[in-house]
Image (cartoon, rainbow, N blue to C red):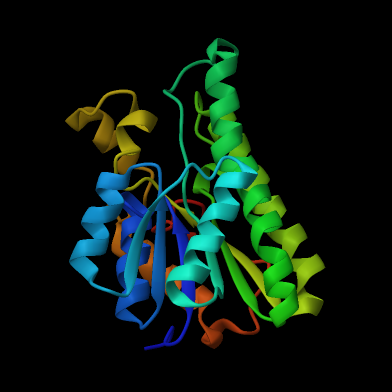
Amino acid sequence: MRLENKIAIVTGGGSGFGEGIVRKFVAEGAKVLIADRNMEGAERVAQTVGAQAKAFEVDVASLSGFQSAVDAAQSAFGGLHILVNNAGVGHLPQPLEAVEEDVFDRVASVNMKAIYFGARATVPLFKAQKYGAILNVASTGGVSPRPNLTWYNASKGWAITATRGMAVELAPFGIRVNAINPVAGDTPLLKTFMGEDTPEIRAKFLSTIPIGRFSTPEDMGNAAAFLCSDEASMITGVAMEVDGGRCI
């Protein structure tokens, strides 16, 4: 129960890594607002974990949307202590000069600007209570980029740098900011990264992961629960690679 009495928002919590984080947080005693554009997925997760989670339909790629999620968490559970910026999008593998502007803008909006909006919506509250934990879900792509995913990689590199900058600035206010860097996982985003899902392409991806398997939502939940718990009270500004050794 390392997150007992904690209240969290997990963006993109209705599937994939976000779902794994929601499930682990609830198991560790937290109350969680599942903030997702996919209300069907968010409600499915909420129904399976019980009254400690609430589904909330929102697009966090806007300040008003993010603020509405913060308001909903406070209304439902009476406060807020943890923000997990998990919502993310990718683009199909292709030469960097071939990516259309609207695709680039969507990647930047969800993977980068939502972190900025999240900070604007939560940091004043966290400063006032002199306590808060923010976790940004970045990627191994931000450390060791794969070809033909350049703008996705760049957005995750930005998330890692933002994490470090936020950590330094917010530490005096009792706010910790960390990131996790997942390697490819068997989630809805996997097909986007691979272009097509074939045994040959899966084998190619797996060949770059020394442990020999894709990451799972449970892997991300375990890492996220630790970094957001008081057990990690001396850890801030870390971008933890949860990658089976890919970035070695």
Give the image location of residue 126, x and y in percent.
68, 73
Could you tell whether 104 is left or right of 47 in the image? right
**Residue at coordinates 41% horizontally, 64% vertically from top-left?**
33
Does residue 151 lie above or below 167 as drawn? above
Could you tell whether 121 is left or right of 59 in the image? right
Instruction: Give the image quarter of residue 127.
Output: bottom right
Does residue 93 lie above or below 172 as drawn? above
* Along the viewing direction, whichever of 189 and 118 lies nearer the viewer: 118
Could you tell whether 182 is left or right of 110 in the image? left
- Numbered-mark total: 0
* Along the viewing direction, whichever of 80 and 204 lies nearer the viewer: 80
Q: Quadrant of the N terminus?
A: bottom left
Give the image location of residue 84, x and y in percent.
51, 61
**Residue at coordinates 66% horizontally, 57% vertically from top-left?**
121
Does residue 159 lie above or below 178 as drawn? above
Give the image location of residue 87, x and y in percent.
46, 47
Q: Which residue sits furthest front? A: 75
In this rendering, does residue 188 appear at all?
Answer: yes
In this rendering, does residue 219 appear at all?
Answer: no
Instruction: Give the image quarter of residue 176.
Output: bottom right
Give the image location of residue 211, x and y in percent.
32, 58
**Residue at coordinates 45% horizontally, 46% vertically from top-left?**
58
